[in-house]
Image (cartoon, rainbow, N blue to C red):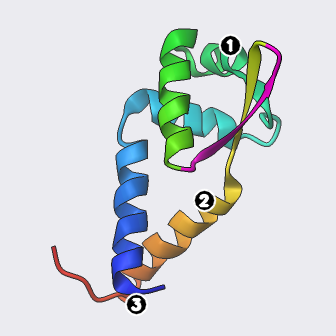
Amino acid sequence: MKDNQVVRIVEEGALVLSERSRLELFRVLSLPENDWKTTGILADKAGIRPSVASHHLQIMETSGWVKRVTSGPHARWSLNREKLEEFELALKSLVKGESEWQS
């Protein structure tokens, strides 16, 4: 990965995960049994209102962190594990000093 790409990936991931409700949704979606859950189920497990969950899931979808499928009036959400792996690799690259960058 190029330095500017590493920084962009880490900054974007940090921004998405910096909000407590999104971090809680991320935690719930990361659990193995939580693949393709509805907004209501995710909200309940995250301890937030469905409208709040919907708002944050849309933000996470825009940045590629979650995937959505719609069936009738209901959306089902799943963590984009490829995006998580990309973030993990970029973060490791920074921590190991494999990427030279300046703010």
Q: Amino acid at mark 1?
A: Gly
Give the magenta part as a residue range: 64-72
Picture quadrant where residue 43 is located: top right
Q: Quick check: 49 left or right of 32?
A: left
Of callouts 1 and 3, which one flags the residue occurring earlier in the amino acid sequence?
1
Secondary structure type for disc 2: helix
As helix, strand or loop, the secondary structure at mark 3 comes to loop
Residue 18 position in % (x across, y down)? 35, 42
* Residue ranking furthest to the left: 103
Q: Quadrant of the C terminus?
A: bottom left
Q: Tell me the chief SS of the magenta region.
A: strand
Residue 94 picture location, percent across and down = 37, 78
Q: Residue 7 vs residue 78: left or right? A: left
The answer to whether residue 42 is above or below residue 95 is above
Q: What label does residue 40 carry, if any? A: 1
State the residue at coordinates (57%, 48%): 65
Q: Which mark is residue 98?
A: 3
Q: Is residue 67 visible?
A: yes
Query: Which label sits on residue 83?
Result: 2
User: Depth-wise, is mark 1 or mark 3 nearer the camera?
Assistant: 1
Mark positioned earlier in the residue sequence (1 or 2): 1
Identify which amino acid the numbered label 2 is placed on. Answer: Lys
Q: Secondary structure at mark 1?
A: helix
